[in-house]
């Protein structure tokens, strides 16, 4: 089962956030499971249409995902999925 | 005058409070986070913060204890499959306006968003839903477009205190819309305005009212600072008449305020043309009319008159009784106790100021 790791920046809003195991057929399922652990966290990462927010990146074993709209990138059974914030803002 | 000034800024919500002699900071919340609108609901004193996290999306928070603690609520969300234009999914990008639904509808709250959706709550803000009648308006996909922001946005919501089913909204860029039935149907109210960026400046939609306000003493008198000038309506937006100066600063700008007790007295915060968008000739002034826009007086006493680049965003000029306050793009906050005749500086070192509201 993949391990989900979060940027420290999200801990401001979800202080209990830690590395979490979650599975599913695709990334959308993974975020569905994350939502049960940390209610509200999905809306910080995805918009209401399920697309990745503009200034958030997801890496699967160090490789950035390609499909930011429908989150269809495949991932192996044992992997690390990183939720990172892009370097943007001011 | 109400004793609190609530600010939405690029780096947080800031509340000033007056003890009758001095203004002091009462509260700082969401430090470091952009607050597009800070809003106090006059019906119950609830404070609202509309956040625009650069990374994490639009969020909505409320406080029942003047910012001592906050509760996050579900932000307005577009239903699955909705589109801004064909092929462009609709998701909330910004909350640009907030208004309470009146005393008759004590739990109703309205929100205006980019990309053009109006949202309404009937349970005090616990849940918001898209107002479908406006979203499905036949002009939206073909005739609305971005102005100030990349996509259309609702920046003005005016609920008529005499009849709370009667509401005007202002959209950049589409124009002014009016409902008489609580949002079930909408009429376009752009007669007399000009859209100089369209092949036909008198087009039905595509206008850019930067902000729309109604006179509390006579809600049939409406004012707007438009992209092309200052406009006024004396017949409930049936027609608009330009009241800009032909020579003089009162023309281009973003903000407008109207006196609580006099529908013919209003203030604007002029900026140098849409090509430049700085203080005119490096000097800040507020212009006031006392006669419905026939004449404008320049109010400069106490405001910087050289080397100044400030402009005032559309929600950042407010009035209460004899008092006025405005915040600028470079983080200056000014206060006038005498309807603009003289000004005091409350702070020169704030973040960029998006919204200013007087509150209890």
Image (tube, rainbow, N blue to C red):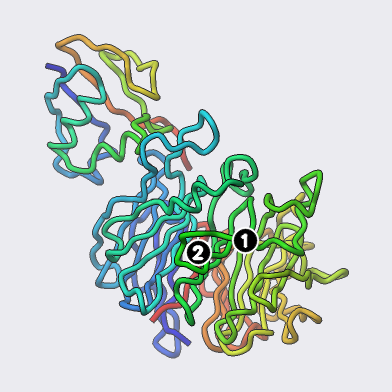
Measured Cα–Cα span from mark 1 to mark 2: 21 Å
Find disc 2 in the rendering and name its residue.
Answer: B355
Check the image and name the residue furthest to the right: B247
- Residue B307 visible from this viewpoint: no
Q: Is B160 left, or right, of B255 in this rendering?
A: left
Residue B167 placed where, x, y %? Answer: 51, 68
Q: Which chain is disc 1 placed on? A: B
Residue B92 placed where, x, y %? Answer: 43, 44
B198 w.r.t. B40: above or below: above
Q: Quadrant of the C terminus of chain B?
A: bottom left
Q: Nearer the viewer, residue B119 or B277?
A: B119
**Snapshot quadrant of residue B338:** bottom right
Residue B253 placed where, x, y %? Answer: 70, 62
Q: Nearer the viewer, residue B3 or B212?
A: B212
Q: Is B7 left, or right, of B217 in this rendering?
A: left
N-terminal of the two: label 1 or label 2?
1
Find disc 1 in the rendering and name its residue.
Answer: B176
B223 w.r.t. B34: above or below: below
Residue B25 placed where, x, y %? Answer: 39, 73
SS for tag 1?
strand
SS for tag 2?
strand
Q: Which chain is disc 2 placed on? A: B
Crowding at label 2, few (<14), some or many (≥20) Cα neighbours within 10 Å? Answer: many
Check the image and name the residue furthest to the top: A76
B242 w.r.t. A21: above or below: below
Q: Nearer the viewer, mark 1 or mark 2?
A: 1
Q: How many circles with numbers are drawn on the protein?
A: 2
**Snapshot quadrant of residue B91:** top left
- Residue B328 visible from this viewpoint: yes
Q: Is B242 left, or right, of B359 in this rendering?
A: right
Q: Is A2 left, or right, of B121 in this rendering?
A: left
Residue in view at x 59 percent, y 80 percent: B215
């Amino acid at each position: 089962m993949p391990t989900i790791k979060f940027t420290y920046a999200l801990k401001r809003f979800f202080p209990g956030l830690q590395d979490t195991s979650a599975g599913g057929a695709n990334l959308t399922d993974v975020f569905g499971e994350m939502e049960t652990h940390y209610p509200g966290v999905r809306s910080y990462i995805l918009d209401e249409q399920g697309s990745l927010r503009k200034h958030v990146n997801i890496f699967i074993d160090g490789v950035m995902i390609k499909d930011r709209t429908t989150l269809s990138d495949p991932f192996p059974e044992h992997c690390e999925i990183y939720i990172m914030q892009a370097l943007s803002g001011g | 005058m109400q004793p609190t000034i609530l600010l939405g800024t690029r780096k947080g919500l800031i509340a000033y409070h007056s003890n009758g002699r001095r203004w002091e900071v009462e509260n700082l919340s969401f430090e470091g986070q952009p607050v597009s609108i800070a809003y106090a609901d006059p019906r119950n004193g609830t404070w609202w913060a509309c956040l625009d996290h650069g990374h994490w999306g639009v969020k909505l928070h409320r406080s029942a204890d003047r910012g001592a603690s906050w509760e996050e609520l579900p932000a307005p969300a577009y239903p699955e499959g909705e589109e801004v234009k064909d092929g462009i999914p609709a998701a909330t990008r910004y909350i640009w306006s907030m208004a309470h639904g009146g005393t008759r509808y004590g739990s109703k709250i309205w929100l205006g968003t980019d990309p053009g959706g109006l949202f309404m709550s009937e349970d005090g803000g616990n849940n918001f839903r898209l107002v479908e009648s406006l979203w499905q308006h036949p002009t939206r996909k073909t005739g609305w477009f971005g102005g100030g922001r990349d996509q259309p946005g609702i920046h003005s919501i005016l609920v008529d205190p005499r009849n709370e089913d009667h509401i005007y909204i202002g959209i950049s860029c589409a124009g002014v819309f009016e409902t008489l039935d609580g949002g079930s149907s909408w009429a376009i109210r752009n007669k007399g305005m000009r859209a100089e960026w369209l092949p036909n400046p008198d087009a039905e939609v595509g206008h850019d009212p930067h902000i729309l306000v109604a006179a509390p003493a006579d809600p049939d008198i409406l004012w707007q600072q438009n992209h092309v000038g200052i406009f006024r309506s004396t017949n409930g937006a049936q027609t608009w008449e330009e009241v800009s100066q032909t020579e003089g600063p009162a023309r281009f700008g973003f903000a407008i305020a109207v006196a609580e007790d006099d529908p013919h007295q209003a203030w604007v915060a002029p900026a140098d043309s849409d090509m430049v968008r700085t203080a005119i000739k490096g000097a800040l002034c507020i212009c006031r009319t006392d006669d419905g826009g026939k004449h404008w007086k320049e109010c400069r006493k106490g405001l910087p008159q050289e080397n100044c680049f400030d402009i005032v965003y559309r929600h950042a000029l407010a009035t209460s009784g004899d008092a006025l306050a405005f915040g600028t793009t470079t983080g200056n906050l000014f206060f006038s106790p005498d309807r603009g005749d003289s000004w005091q500086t409350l702070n020169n070192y704030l973040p960029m100021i998006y919204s200013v509201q007087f509150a209890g």
